[in-house]
Image (cartoon, rainbow, N blue to C red):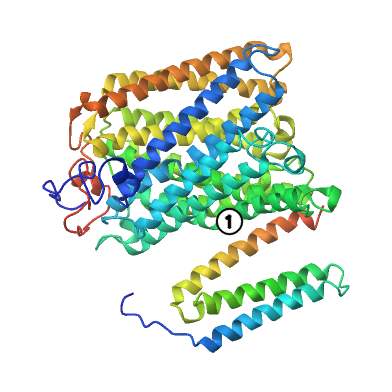
Amino acid sequence: MENEKHHIVPYMTHIMVLLGLILLTVITVLITSVELGAYNTAAAMLIASLKGAVVLLYFMHLKFDHKIYWVMVSLVIAIFAAVIVVTFFDYLYR
Amino acid sequence: MTDNIETRHEPNYLEYRGKHGGILGWLTTTDHKRIGLLYFYSMMTFFLAGVVMGLLMKYELISPGEQIMGPQTYNGLFTLHGLTMIFLFVIPGVAAVFGNFFLPILIGAKDVSFPRLNLMSWYLYIIGAIVVLISQFMGDGPPDTGWTFYAPYSLKTNTNVVAAVTGAFILGFSSILTGLNFIVTMHRLRAPGMGWLRMPLFGWALYGTGWIQLLATPVVGITFLMVIAERVLGIGFFDPAIGGDPILYQHLFWIYSHPAVYIMILPAMGAITEIIPTFARKTIFGYTAIVISSMAIAFVGYFVWGHHMFTSGMSSTSRWVFSLLTFLVAIPSAIKVFNWTATLYKGSINIQTPFLWSIAFIFVFMIGGFSGLVVGSLATDIHVHDTAFVVAHFHYIVFGGTGFAFFGALHYWYPKMFARVYNFKIANIGLLIFFIGFNLLYFPMFYLGMLGMPRRYYDYLPMFHSANTLSTIGSWIMAAGLLVIIINLARARRGKGKEVDDPWDGKTLEWQIASPPPVENFEQIPVVEHGPYEY
């Protein structure tokens, strides 16, 4: 671990990510005024997932980390997705 | 595991005087063993408070009609009993006390990966506990929702729900940080030669538990924040009157709270798995199967939460899906029981107090497990849902499982923690009284539930009288047994017990160092050359 190289992310990248997150937040608010029916929720979830992914990749350095962290995060996301699927056995068939 | 490791000239963790002495030395310690003891003493305090609440509730139910409290007091009391026992005793439970104390030693490390974070976890635990207790005395009275805080009632009651859920939220952080610490410790600090499949099984149990703590606890944290947001800001998450969905609350709550059962029981199973080979004088049967079953329980246990909601109005499709998944989780649990009993087969069994606790654990856990099949089946659950049957099943699993394993582990590791042995005869008598009292207290509740006696009422119909009286008498016997056990252990701690190093001739690493363990456990990190249970 001690010998691993630490990737230094330029300030500009962080600023761009921050601006991206602000833009996505604005889109989240604006999209509520567009009538998409049930897709409104899907759109909100999609934007939130994008924001989460950007935070994970850049602010939490996943993009520059060892593969094992990719595996761990992927497993967690897979479990989370499975929980959502199982929950929807209720919502889709109620 | 390795040749005997001599560390006797090092000061032990009880004698060590660091920067601060006395109580300040304890409150600022980052030694995993001392933090384990901080958890132990605080948890035992909360546990005994919870026992007193339980005794009061059982006394109220000794006969029909009001005895010592009215309905509102009873509602508040069972809520506080649940909060105390669940969030302050069984969830931190075996992991916080014995995991903290023994995990680094068992894997040949000097401490956990993040010792300061470990101390912070204990402080969060204490702060959370204080907030929960304060909730009883401020605002409009103690919460009366039960420990589940079901919406929409928890949104409408005038009692002090916000403070109670805030306390539970803080306690969740303590749990997450402990889980994280244990996972990283096992990944990074295993002794040279200790591959994953040479790690003691208590470590594996804590590993599975750590992942559940890490992945499930945030869900309930966010759910509690949503309850606060709805109560304070009127945002319609769960109340149908303002566009919310009360079943969503139940989903979110049980997505955490069912895996929480495995947070309680997995370390308990791990402790039993350490005790049995030591007293069977035999290698554990099916090491790999136990490892896989621990991880399978952690994984499958994540997907069975809906069995708490069979009668809540969720879709019939999801009911059978959850019922099926629930039956699947019985398989890895049964594998463990088979492995424990197979380990005993042809072993040179040394019948000592920790072994007797383990056998008692298996007995009560089996009753809890089999009654779980009744509530896991859709048809029979409809009949017994929200009755005393569920209370009995729950206590057989949680108290019978975690509680018995906790006391078993305490009797097993006590000589290592304090270098003293307790009086074996009194310990066995205490266990016998406790065991009789426990079964007399909870078994009649199965019968009462089958007859249809609802749970969470301070009063009942005369037809339920005799079984309730029997159950109340059982609570007194169990409390008497508990008293014998605690006094016996306290006497040994106060110097009445014989000084020992290793009364059981254990093979895992903790038995290779001095008792009580030196401050840094090992002068030199050991090199592990074989598996943990080589007899």
Residue located at (27% from left, 51% from top): B105
User: In which image quadrant can residue B34 be found?
Assistant: top left
Q: Judge whether B514 appears above or below B438 on screen.
A: below
Residue located at (57% from left, 45% from top): B167
Kind of residue at disc 1? Pro
Chain of the residue that carries numbered disc 1 in the rendered image? B
- The image shows residue B145 at horizontal and vertical percentages of 69, 36
- The image shows residue B84 at horizontal and vertical percentages of 54, 35
Q: From the viewer's perspective, is B21 left or right of A12? A: left
- The image shows residue B44 at horizontal and vertical percentages of 42, 33
The residue under label 1 is B218
User: In which image quadrant can residue B524 be found?
Assistant: bottom left
Residue located at (58% from left, 84% from top): A15
User: In which image quadrant can residue B535 be found?
Assistant: top left
Give whichever of B311, A41 is nearer the camera. A41
Give whichever of B153, B254 is nearer the camera. B153
Give whichever of B133, A63 is nearer the camera. B133
